[in-house]
Image (tube, grey):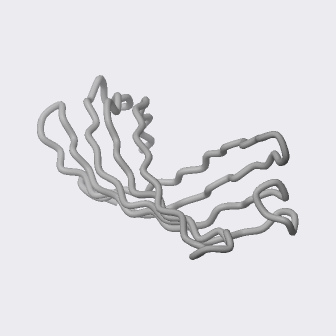
Amino acid sequence: MNIWLGVLGDVSGVWATNSINQGAAIPYLFGPRVNVRHGLLTPFVQVLLGGVVTSSGIEQTGWQNHFAMTAAGGIDVKLSKRFSIGPVQAEYFLTKIPDGLNNRQNNLRFSAGIVFRFG
C-alpha cells in the first residue's frame, strides 16, 4: 500500500430485544480507504463490502449470512505516527436481510473513535 490508499476491516455487533424476540446481528466488512493527508488532518472516503450474520431472533431460521456494505467519509486528526482520533465518520449502511417487505435496510451510522496505524 502507499500513503493515500489503505485497507480497512470492520467487525461490529448489535443485540436487539423486545417483549417477544431477542437476536443478534454481526456485520463483517472489508475494503479500500482513500486518504487525503493534509498536515494533521486526514479526510477520507471508503467503501466496505461483506456480510451480516443474523441470529434466530432477527430471522426465523437460525443463524444466517446476508449481504452488507457501507459507503463512508470522515476525518482523522493525527496525534502521533501511530495514533489519531476520528472525531466524525458518517456512513450509509446497507443490509439485505429478508424482512417480508423489500428485503433491504437502508441505515445511517455516525461514529467517532481512536485510529491505530500499523506498518
Q: In the rendered view, would you say 21 is above or below 49?
A: above
x and y percent of residue 21 in the render?
83, 48
x and y percent of residue 87 in the render?
32, 30
Residue displayed at 44% across by 46% down: 109
Residue displayed at 24% across by 55% down: 4
Residue 42, image quadrant: top left
Q: In the rendered view, would you say 50 is above or below 4?
A: below
x and y percent of residue 66 in the render?
66, 70
Instruction: From the viewer's perspective, tell me whether residue 6 is left or right of residue 24.
Output: left
Residue displayed at 21% across by 45% down: 43
Q: Quadrant of the C terminus?
A: top left
Q: In the rendered view, would you say 41 is above or below 93?
A: above
x and y percent of residue 30 in the render?
51, 61
Q: Residue furthest left?
A: 38
Front-most of 28 and 82? Answer: 28
Residue 16, image quadrant: top right
Front-most of 89 and 101? Answer: 101
Q: In the rendered view, would you say 62 is above or below 20?
A: below
Residue 50, image quadrant: bottom right
Front-most of 103 and 87? Answer: 103
Q: Quadrant of the N terminus?
A: bottom left
Instruction: From the viewer's perspective, tell me whether residue 108 is left or right of residue 80.
Output: right
Residue displayed at 40% across by 32% down: 112
Front-most of 28 and 80? Answer: 28
